[in-house]
Amino acid sequence: MGLLSWLFGTSDTDADKLSRLQREMSVKQKDINEWQDYIDASQKEKDEIDREVRRLQSALSKKNVAENRLKDKGL
């Protein structure tokens, strides 16, 4: 029982406590969902960067192979 409840002779009922806890959980779940959206967006951006890096590495590898073939042919 809180101080105000004690002073004024009121106390929270179980339904009041449950309602308050449900509101708190709802707020916390909303925060979790917002963070999850941020994490998902960051992961998507990271995946796109990884794909671009692999594409560029592949292109560089092909370029090096082509240059080596030209050197081998004396061109």
Image (cartoon, helix red, strand yellow):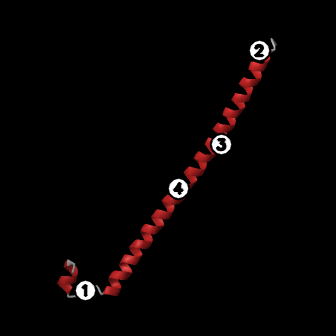
**Secondary structure type for disc 1:** loop
User: Which residue is labeled 4 in the image?
Assistant: 38
Kindly identify which residue carries mark 2: 71
In the image, farthest residue toward the top: 74
What is the secondary structure assignment of the residue under circle 3?
helix
Q: Secondary structure at mark 2?
A: helix
CA–CA distance between discs 1 and 4? 40 Å
Residue 62 position in % (x across, y down): 74, 29
Name the amino acid, label 4: Tyr
- Tell me which label, 1 or 4, sits earlier in the chain: 1
Mark 2 neighbour density, 10 Å: few (under 14) some (14–19) many (20 or more):
few
Q: Earlier in the sequence, mark 2 or mark 1?
A: 1
Q: Which corner quadrant of the image does residue 14 belong to?
A: bottom left
x and y percentages locating residue 19 in the rendered image: 38, 81
Estimate the spatial distance between the alpha carbons at disc 4 and disc 3, rounded to whole Å. Answer: 20 Å
Question: Which residue is labeled 3 in the image?
Answer: 51
In the orientation shown, which residue stands out farthest toward the front? 72
In this view, 64 is above or below 2: above
Q: Earlier in the sequence, mark 4 or mark 3?
A: 4
Image position of 28 with respect to 8: above or below: above
In terms of depth relative to the viewer, which is nearer, 9 or 60? 60
Q: Pointer 3: residues within 10 angstroms few (<14), some, or many (20+)?
A: few
Quadrant for the N terminus in the image: bottom left
Of labels 3 and 1, the one closer to you: 3
Disc 3, disc 1: CB below 8 Å? Answer: no
